[in-house]
Image (cartoon, rainbow, N blue to C red):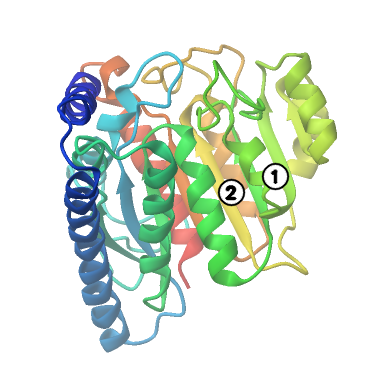
Amino acid sequence: MQQVARRGIHFMRRLHGANIPEDMIVEGQNRVIDASLTLIREKAKLKGELVRALGGAKATSALLGVPLGHNSSFLQGPAFAPPRIREAMWCGSTNATTEGGKEIDNPRVLTDVGDLPVQEIRDCGVDDDRLMNIISQSVKLVMEEEPLRPMVLGGDHSISYPIVRAVSEKLGGPIDILHLDAHPDIYHEFEGNKYSHASSFARIMEGGYARRLLQVGIRSINSEGREQGKKFGVEQYEMRTFSKDRHYLENLKLGEGVKGVYVSIDVDCLDPAFAPGVSHFEPGGLSFRDVLNILHNLQGDIVAADVVEFNPQRDTVDGMTAMVAAKLVRELSAIMSK
């Protein structure tokens, strides 16, 4: 997929070199962008209408896939994750009931608006400045259809920036963020890329989109990560002190006085024993039950969420990590729905 996108970008560069009029290229790009957003808009409108017709839902989780992987600093496999997560969610190996008793096959609890066609957009030569805006627009389109709330399937962690930006702008103010990850992803830039998956939370904090940012599961952090954390007032909870922090983290109360809570789960927050299908193996991580305890006990109104960095290309042959990611999505979607 990465090679296909690069071919598209190289093709567009050749067109520029051949003196093809710039306005012709931009007009074509705009048509593709409009078509892509129209698909999300109309699917969100349909699903919102159906949920409203059923009645009884104050908040419904809406799956939105953002299959972007090119901002990963190592492997680009997360671009292939959304369909693998959906396949695991509905594969029939388990029932549709979450641990809290909600049924995810109830459209009042969970619906699906499909995937933003990221690679097709990039194939037209659209750069990351515009792509980030397109992702934000797609999230806002979902939020426009009450009672839908975006449950975003990544993709690498760079997508959290445009999602959080969209949520904050749409709700009209900052939010609290619970970020579970092995890494703080708060470099000012990484390898010269301001949209790197290692820089997404620097962009979020610079933009003023979060009041509080709690980072849990951290075990790969350097001096810049700590300095950036101090600069932005980030609450960083490292695994080396997790036994001491556990009680607090399993009884979090977030979102009071702001527009709600955003939850971002990088699958590599888990120890590789539980989730080997990730790009960066970081031993010493959270157990799956640790994560569920944090989520199930969280007090706060979750207005949107993402599950990112599952890499199917590194998963076991029987798709173990796909099932792990799927259960994270199921449980988080159930918590978010009302």
Indicate the amino acid at tag 2: Leu
Task: Judge from the rendering whether residue 121 lies leftward or rightward of residue 223; answer left or right.
Answer: left
Task: Judge from the rendering whether residue 228 lies leftward or rightward of residue 311; answer left or right.
Answer: right
Decide if residue 200 is in sight here: yes
Closer to the camera in the image, 118 or 97: 118
Residue 232 in the image, given as x and y percentages of width and height: 80, 39
Residue 99 in the image, given as x and y percentages of width and height: 44, 52
Placement of 60 over or under 115, stated as above or below = below
- Residue at left offset 49%, top offset 49%: 162
Quadrant placement of the N terminus: top left
Q: How many marks?
A: 2
When asked about the image quadrant of residue 156, the answer is top left
Residue 91 in the image, given as x and y percentages of width and height: 17, 42
Placement of 124 over or under 8, stated as above or below = below
Q: Secondary structure at mark 2?
A: helix
- Determine the CA span between mark 1 and mark 2: 23 Å
Residue on which disc 2 sits: 295
Indicate the amino acid at tag 1: Met
Residue on which disc 1 sits: 205
- Residue at left offset 59%, top offset 62%: 168
Q: Secondary structure at mark 1?
A: helix
Decide if residue 251 is in sight here: no
Q: Reading the chain from its start, which is encountered first: label 1 or label 2?
A: 1
